[in-house]
Amino acid sequence: QAQLVESGGGLVQPGGSLRLSCGASGIRFSLYAVAWFRRAPGKERELVAGISSGGTTDYVDFVKGRFTISRDNAENTVYLQMNSLKPEDTGVYSCNAALRINTVLSGQGLWGQGTQVTVSS
């Protein structure tokens, strides 16, 4: 059974860092593109970053230079390293996986359950 599980969320002060993990099972992970999304309180879910099966990355403007997406196919895991966190980064972060990058970037693939990130002093 295909499954994605996110972890690594928590409470962090502004300026701090967190590393989120998206672990996959039940799929040939190395063939899949993965994207991270977030949903802030009271807002629509929005794309944060994506990585293709070949390792090509893409970021939305508001995280460029602060967040880094990477993958470890041996561990069936995609990471989101988040630095210089701001209160507006608060939200539930979820990963999405599919065979095509366009599918994940539009949020139409397999979803995990999400992990809460709270940036507050």
Image: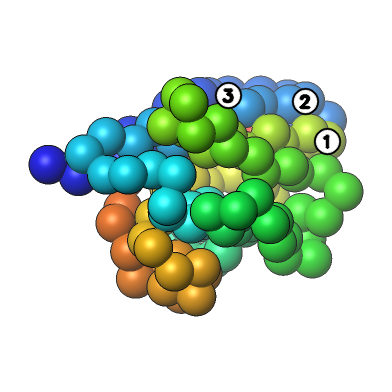
For label 2, the SS is: loop
Mark 2 vs mark 1: which is more N-terminal? 2
Identify the element where label 3 is drawn: strand
Vertical side of 39 occupied by 114: above or below:
above
Around disc 2, counting alpha carbons within 10 Å, would you say few (fewer than 14), some (14 to 19), or many (20 or more)? Answer: some
Residue 57 numbered mark, or none: none
Q: Earlier in the sequence, mark 3 or mark 2?
A: 3
Residue 69: x, y in percent? 66, 44
What is the CA distance from the residue labelled 2 to the residue labelled 1? Answer: 5 Å
Query: Do callouts 3 and 2 mark residues in contact (Cβ within 8 Å)?
Result: no
Q: Earlier in the sequence, mark 1 or mark 3?
A: 3
Q: Count residues near mark 1 (Cα–Cα under 10 Å), then give few for <14, some for 14-19, many for 20+.
A: some
- Marks 1 and 3, how far apart in space? 14 Å
Residue position for label 1: 84
Residue 98, visible in the rendered structure:
yes
Q: Amino acid at mark 3?
A: Leu
The colour scheme applied to this rendered structure is rainbow
Quadrant of residue 12 within the rendered picture? top right
Is 7 above or below relative to 102?
Answer: above
Labels 2 and 1 touching (C-beta < 8 A): no
Amino acid identity at mark 2:
Gly
Instruction: From the top left corner, tell me how far across and down residue 73 is, in percent.
Output: 49, 34
Q: Closer to the observer: label 1 or label 3?
A: 1
Q: Position of residue 60 (x, y in %)?
A: 72, 65
Q: Quadrant of the N terminus?
A: top left
Q: What label sits on residue 16 in the rendered view?
A: 2
**Residue 70 higher or lower than 109, as above or below:** above
Quadrant of the frame with the C terminus: top right
Q: Say the numbered circle drawn on residue 11.
A: 3
| Front position in the image: 9 or 95 | 95
